[in-house]
Image (tube, rainbow, N blue to C red):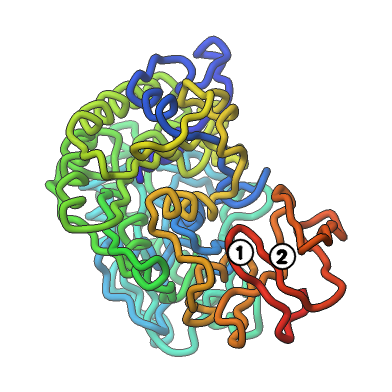
Amino acid sequence: MIVMDGMADRACSELRGMSPLQFVRTPNLDWYVEHGISGLSDPIAPGIRCSTHQAYLSMLGYDARNIVGGSGSFDALGLEMDMQPGDIAMRCYFETIDDSGHVLDPTAGNIASPDTVELVEALDGMEIDGIECHLKAGLYHRAVLILKGDDLSPDISEAYNPDGTVGEVSPLSSDAWFTADVVNRFQAESREILARHVINRRRKNAGLMQANALVPSGASPFPDLQPFEEKYGVSGCCVAGYNLVKGLCKAAGMDVYPMPSACNGRIDTDFEQKMRCALEALEDYDFVLLGYKAPDIAGHRKDPRTKVEIVKELDRTIGHMRAAIGDNVLVAITCSQCTPCELGLHTGDPVPVAVFIKNCIRDDSHEFSENGCSHGNMGRIRGGEFINICMDMADRASSPGSRIRGHRHSQFAAHGHRYCPLAGAACFHRFPPYRHLLAGERRLEPVGPGMEHRIREPLHVIHGGTLSCGHGISY
C-alpha cells in the first residue's frame, strides 16, 4: 500500500486551474489505474476534515472516531520515547507569537534541527507539581512532550483560541483540571526560557523568526489498538520516515523496517531507496505500508511547484517498482487526505485510489488524479473500506460464515456491526445505503437520512456474502 500523504489537491491558479496530479504526466501511476480498478475515497466521511493520524488509522481499517485523543502518543512511539500506560503525550510546535498571542509564523521561520534540538535540551526534564515533563525534538519545527505522573488526563482542549491566537488549554472533564494546569504552567515556563535562549538571540541578529513559543496539541494517552495481524490474519510492516506513521504502526503491532538516514519524513527523502526497502520487506511480510510525507509538506507550505516535482519523482519511483515487483503482489495506491496548496490545510475532499493485482477486472479509468479516478468501478468509498477491498482482492478476507473471535476482535466492529455468539458470525445492524439489499423477498428500506435500515422481525439475511441472523439482536 503506497500512501502519498496529502497528494490530493484542488485547482491551483499557478497550475492553470489544475491540481498537481492533473498538471503533469504520470505514466506509471496511470498504468495502475488503466490495468486495475480505481475510485475516490473519503478518509473519514464526505466533507469531514481529518488529521494525518486519523487518515492513516482509517486506511488501516480502524475507526478513527473511537480513538481517544490526538496524535501525541503516536508521535512519541515513533520517536522511540519511553511512553507507558498512564502517561500523556502531546505534539508541540515551535512558533513565533507576539505579546497578545497572535501567531506571526506557525513554523518559527521554518526552524529545524539543530536549532530545535538545542531548544528542546533547555526545556527537557522540567518538573511541575510532581509531574515529569520529557521533551524530544521531532521533524522540522515539531517536538513531542510526555507527561509522567499520577492523575493525568488527555481531556484538555487545544491551546489555540477561536480567533487563532495561542492561549491556555482548558479542562474538558472534571478529571482534567490538574493536567490543564500543568500544561499551562509548562507553556509559561517554556516561553521564559525560550525568550532568553542563545538560539533565539542568534536568530534575531540574523533577521530570522524567533521560536519564542512551544505550543502543545493533540493530548493522548497510551494507545490501545487491536493488533493488525490479529485483525486481518496477515503480518504487517511499515516503511516510513515520518515519526507519526511509524508510531501508529508500532501501536498496531506492526514492525517498522529499518532504513538509512536518507529515507526520512522530509521533502528531501530518498524516494527510490525507500521503495527498495519496501520491496525487501515484501520478502518477509504479507503487508507493507509505504508512506511518503513529502507531498503533504509541500501542500502545507502552499508550494504547488514543489508538489509537481514530487509527483514526477514518485511516478518515476513507482515505475521502477513496477519493473521489479512480482506478479503475485497486490499494489494499492492512495493519498491519505487532501492538502490543497492554495489553503495549506487538510480538507474533506475525497482522494484518488487505485488497486491492481494480476487478472483483476479493469474499469474505464485512465488517469490517476482527483477527476480521473472518479470514473472507476470502485466508486466513492470511505477510507475504512479501502483495506477491506484490498484484502478481498488479495484473497485474504475472512470467509463467509467463519467464526469470529468476538466483537472487539472482529473486522466488522469498525463498521458498527455487532457480534452474535449464537450465530458465530457478525450480526449487522447498519447497512451501507449504496448496496442493494434483499432479505428473501423482503426489501430492506432506509428509515432515515443516515445508514440505518429496519427489519421488522428476526430473520436470516445474506449481505455481502456474510451470514447475519436475528438471535436476540435488534436489527
> Could you say which disc has been placed on residue 430 in the image?
2
Q: Position of residue 190 (x, y in %)?
A: 39, 63
Is 50 above or below relative to 275? below
Q: Residue at x 41, y 76 (%)?
A: 222
Question: Which structural element holds mark 1?
Answer: helix
Front one among 26 and 393: 393
Is 223 above or below relative to 265? below
Q: Amino acid at mark 1?
A: His
Q: Residue at x 67, y 43 (%)?
A: 47
Q: Is residue 150 left or right of residue 133?
A: right
Is 374 above or below relative to 225? above
Please identify the quarter of the rendering in which residue 310 is found: top left
Q: Position of residue 98 (x, y in %)?
A: 52, 46
Q: Amino acid at mark 2?
A: Arg
Q: Is residue 467 left or right of residue 115?
A: right
Question: Which structural element holds mark 2?
Answer: loop
Q: Position of residue 350 (x, y in %)?
A: 59, 38
Front one among 140 and 182: 140
Q: Position of residue 319 (x, y in %)?
A: 26, 26
Query: Does any portion of residue 181 appear in the rendered image?
Result: yes
Q: Which residue bears the numbered disc 1?
A: 415
Whether label 1 touches label 2, CB < 8 Å: yes
Image quadrant occupied by the C terminus = bottom right
Front one among 75 and 209: 75
CA gap between label 1 and label 2 equals 8 Å
Query: Does any portion of residue 189 appear in the rendered image?
Result: no
